[in-house]
């Protein structure tokens, strides 16, 4: 944790607006079931590893040169992958970075900054507000429904009203939303876009591939909306979190503006090669999505049966409530080898849907804790 040491006096050198902040980061512990960061539990298949190695072998002698700054082949592969969803996407509409976190950083560097505002609807992905803060963008925490029947959802009227009153330069809509798992309808994105005629609207679809049937992607709305951005990542469904490759689709003109803020050659030759190889095996890399979704649905069913209150999820994780004390249950699970996430919502924890064995492990350990955790 990057807390300033009072003895060193270094804290006094830090930017005033960062003083007292703590660094983001979930524990990285060696446990039997690591279900706390929404990774894909399945390793990269041997066949893909072999192709990655072949691709790297061809590229490594050329490491004396900088990588392709425009990552042209990778952008074409990402555009082809996105187009499989039914909405054609061209390479010029695609931008990528070291994880979608870097893509979000580029968006805030370009469209946020001093004297500017960003709004997101909390609880949501905490890096949206953290990156806003680190880019000196004022963060406005919008609200989600607290109606028990529609808990944590967003509706078009409320989103539009909150945007009008915040008058932001950037709007974040996370769908499916981390940590709640809830997704929005396209009407919410349309309402946000119309309510913020001077803002860039970012739909963070990091978990888009896990959406249930009938939950649409905002990619279908890109045509004719030059201020709309959809961010995606290879870290989740694509099982490539360690590869650090996130991307976005938007109007080519907006993509062009991001060149103003990126570091030259920000995507290494190795990152590009590994991601290209993975994309060549998209079907295989995504072949675990079905089983992960089954485990997600199983978690919802079984948590309900155990007396907890899971939130319906379109992602690869489930937020569940009804806990007497989330921190106590989090520690009790960890003591028994199961690591989940305490996202700071009182009485709730978030668990990632992993392999069937990991799900069984989690459910059995939770059940064995007994009703005093309820
Ligand atoms: N968006 C959301 C909603 C996330 O949950 C995450 C990762 N937890 C990210 C973006 C960033 O992921 P990455 O940088 O690995 O692409």
Image: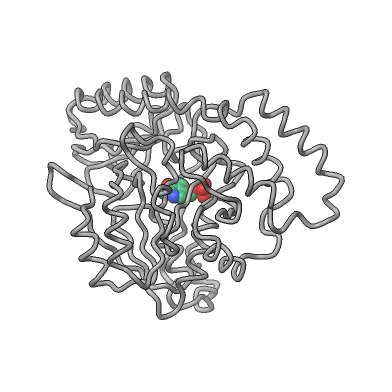
Residue 8, compared with residue 171, is above or below; it is below
In depth, the one of 89 and 12 nearer the eye is 89
The residue depicted at 52 percent of the width and 69 percent of the height is 109
Q: By what rule are the colours in the image chosen?
A: one colour
How many numbered circles does the render carry? 0
Residue 191, compared with residue 340, is above or below; it is below
Q: Could you tell whether 298 is left or right of 5 in the image?
A: left
The residue depicted at 72 percent of the width and 30 percent of the height is 51
Q: Could you tell whether 366 is left or right of 48 in the image?
A: left
The residue depicted at 43 percent of the width and 54 percent of the height is 222
Name the spot of residue 105 as percent of width and height, x first: 51, 62
Name the spot of residue 208 as percent of width and height, x first: 41, 41
Q: Examine the image and state in which quarter residue 44 appears.
A: top right
Residue ranking furthest to the bottom: 115
In depth, the one of 329 and 180 nearer the eye is 180
Q: Could you tell whether 185 is left or right of 79 in the image?
A: left
Residue 253, compared with residue 300, is above or below; it is below
Residue 109, compared with residue 77, is above or below; it is below
Name the spot of residue 284 as percent of width and height, x first: 57, 26
In depth, the one of 314 and 333 nearer the eye is 314
| Image quarter of the C terminus | top left
Q: Examine the image and state in which quarter residue 60 appears.
A: top right
Name the spot of residue 149 as percent of width and height, x first: 13, 41
The residue depicted at 29 percent of the width and 39 percent of the height is 319
Q: Examine the image and state in which quarter residue 341 appears.
A: top left
């Amino acid at each position: 944790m990057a807390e300033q040491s009072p003895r060193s006096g270094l804290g006094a050198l830090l930017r005033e607006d960062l003083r007292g902040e703590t660094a983001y980061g979930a524990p990285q512990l060696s446990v039997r079931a690591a279900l706390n960061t929404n990774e894909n539990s399945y390793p990269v298949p041997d066949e893909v590893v072999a192709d990655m190695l072949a691709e790297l072998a061809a590229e490594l002698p050329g490491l004396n040169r900088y990588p392709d700054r425009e990552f042209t082949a990778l952008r074409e592969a990402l555009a082809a992958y996105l187009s499989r969803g039914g909405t054609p996407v061209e390479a010029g509409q695609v931008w990528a970075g070291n994880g979608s976190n870097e893509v979000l950083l580029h968006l805030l560097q370009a469209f946020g900054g001093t004297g500017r505002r960003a709004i997101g609807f909390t609880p949501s992905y905490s890096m949206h507000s953290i990156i806003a803060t680190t880019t000196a963008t004022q963060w406005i925490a919008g609200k989600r429904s607290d109606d028990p029947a529609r808990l944590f959802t967003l509706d078009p009227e409320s989103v539009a009203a909150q945007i009008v009153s915040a008058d932001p330069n950037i709007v974040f809509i996370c769908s499916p939303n981390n940590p709640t798992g809830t997704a929005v309808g396209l009407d919410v994105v349309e309402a946000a876009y119309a309510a913020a005629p001077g803002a860039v609207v970012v739909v963070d679809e990091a978990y888009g591939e896990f959406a249930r049937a009938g939950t649409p992607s905002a990619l279908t709305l890109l045509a004719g909306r030059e201020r709309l951005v959809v961010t995606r990542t290879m870290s989740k469904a694509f099982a490539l979190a360690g590869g650090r490759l996130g991307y976005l689709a938007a109007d080519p003109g907006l993509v062009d503006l991001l060149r103003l803020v990126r570091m030259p050659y920000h995507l290494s030759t190795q990152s590009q090669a590994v991601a290209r190889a993975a994309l060549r095996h998209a079907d295989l890399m995504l072949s675990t999505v079905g089983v992960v979704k089954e485990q997600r649905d199983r978690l919802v069913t079984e948590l309900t049966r155990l007396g907890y209150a899971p939130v319906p999820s379109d992602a690869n994780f489930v937020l569940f409530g009804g806990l007497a004390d989330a921190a106590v249950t989090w520690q009790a699970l960890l003591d028994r080898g199961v690591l989940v996430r305490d996202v700071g919502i009182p009485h709730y924890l978030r668990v990632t849907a992993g392999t069937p064995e990991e799900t069984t492990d989690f459910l059995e350990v939770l059940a064995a804790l007994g009703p005093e955790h309820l």
